Every structure is written in C-alpha cells, then in structure tokens.
Image (cartoon, rainbow, N blue to C red):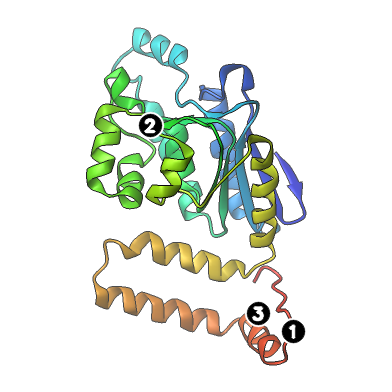
Amino acid sequence: MEHDGALAVVVLDRPGQRNALDAALKVALRDALDRLGRDPAVRAVVLTGGGSAFCVGQDLGEHAAALEADPATAFATVTEHYAPIVTAITTMPKPVVAAVNGTCVGAGLGFALACDVRVLAAGATLGTAFSGIGLTCDSALSATLAAEVGVGRARELVLLATPFTPEDAVGWGLAGRVVAPDEVLPTARELGLRLAAGPTAAYAASKRLLAAGVGRSLAATLAAEADEQAALGLTAYHQGAVAAFLGKRRPEFRGE
C-alpha cells in the first residue's frame, strides 16, 4: 500500500499467482480496507492488482487443501474474509476506484463491482467463473452484477460463466472507461486524486443513498435524501462552496 497525499493505493500483490486470494492476502486486504475506512487522512482509495492480472479469485490450491481437511469448514472464508472485504469497500465513507489492470474473475469481479468507479484495461478478461467449479456467487456478485446489467444478463453470465470483454462491460454499464493496460493505474490515480480533493462527506452520503435506493420506496428515498441534504447543509464546506460558486471561485474541500 502507498499513499499520495489523501489518496491510498492498495495493491493485491501475488503477481506470480495472478493475485489469487489465499488466506494471507485476504486477511491483509480485509485489514487494510478496515484501517483506510477509519483513517480521516485518507479521502479516496484505489484498488489494483500487481503484475498483469487484477484478481483471479480464490486460490484453488488452498481451497482444495481446505476441502480435504474438512469440507464442512472450507467455506468459512466467505464470511470471515470475502463478506468483510466487500462490506468494507461498499460502506467505506470515501470513494474507491478499481484499477482493473488485467484478468478479473470470480471474487475479483465481485471486488471490482463493489468499488464506486472502475477503470478497465483493454484486452482484459472478465467473468463470474463460479459455475465452472460447481459453485455459486460470493462477494455480493449476485446483487451487484444484477443491479448493473439486469437480472436476465446477470443470470446468463453466472450460469454459463461466459467471459466478457471490457468493451462489453462499458456497453452494459459496468464501467465508464477502457484504457491501454499501462494507462490503467495512472488513470485510476488521476480519478482518485480528483475524488480525494472533493467533498468527502457528500461522497459518503451519496454512497449510502445509492446503496439503499434500489430497495427503498419512493417516499423512503425522498425522506433519506432530505435527511442527508439537511446534514450536509450544516457543513462549512457546503456553505463555503456556495460562496465560492457565487464569487466565481473554485471551491476547496478539506475532507469535511
């Protein structure tokens, strides 16, 4: 992990294994995200992979050993690691950018879809992968994928485990941009720095509203928006930003 001012860059660093998720990597990622979520000096996060892959999901060698030792406990990792990782990303009160620098499948795709913004490398392979080994989704993929592409397309992608391209992802609304592989991290860092200089509390409120909005009634949505706006309206940065706009100046946000 490295810091660039208020931006933290987290690297999944098992390039020789294409960032397959073994216990050590899952624990390190879970704990790093927890720390960053609570660190007021960090105002945006970039998540990327070391080497040529973003993340190929679970380390199947480790999983096979766990199945041999005790099939009844082999999937404890879902609640101990995968669920807390995705929860940390989605509930983090600051933006998270996924710099998808290469292959992104299984739980890796789940992590990327939990992020707020995605930058994809041209030529990368994306996919759900789970049904290929006789499993179903984890890492909230059954919810995030369906929310982004629709239930029908999500059903096909999950059941058939059909790989898809970054261009497909953009066309379906999964991501906003595809860039050359060597531009993925610089582009993500640029976006991260832009977000780190923005209204952190407003971003946190927006994440809360968007996460809950799909299942809420219209009345509940309107009430939640009113509450968030009222709270933000009391902040000095909102009042300063309004004054800056009227004075034709660029607003400055300091992490409030």
Residue 184, image x and y in percent? 64, 41
Q: Sequence order check: which comes first, mark 2 or mark 1?
A: 2
Where, quadrant-wise, is the C terminus in this rendering? bottom right
Q: Sequence order check: which comes first, mark 1 or mark 3?
A: 3
**Mark 2: few/some/many CA within 10 Å (<14, 14-19, 20+):** few
Residue 118, image x and y in percent? 53, 48
Task: Kindly identify the residue that appears in the image at 65 percent across and 26 percent down.
Answer: 51
Task: Kindly identify the residue that appears in the image at 68 percent across and 85 percent down.
Answer: 240
Residue 174, image x and y in percent? 42, 48
Q: Are marks 1 and 3 in contact (CB under 8 Å)?
A: no
User: Quick one: SS at disc 3?
Assistant: helix
**Mark 1: few/some/many CA within 10 Å (<14, 14-19, 20+):** few
**Residue 211 occupies quadrant:** bottom left
Say which residue label 1 marks.
Answer: 249
Indicate left or right for 45 with 130 as reference.
right
For the residue pair 222 and 35, the one nearer the viewer reads as 222
Say which residue label 2 marks.
Answer: 78
User: Quick one: SS at disc 1?
Assistant: loop
User: Quick one: SS at disc 2?
Assistant: helix
Q: Are marks 2 and 1 in contact (CB under 8 Å)?
A: no
For the residue pair 45 and 230, the one nearer the viewer reads as 45
Between tags 2 and 1, which lies in front? Answer: 1
Say which residue label 3 marks.
Answer: 237
Residue 174 visible, this orientation: no
Where, quadrant-wise, is the N terminus in this rendering? top right
Residue 104 visible, this orientation: yes
**Mark 3: few/some/many CA within 10 Å (<14, 14-19, 20+):** many
Residue, far right = 5
**Residue 83 occupies quadrant:** top left
Residue 205, image x and y in percent? 48, 68
Please, is residue 20 above or below residue 212 in the view? above
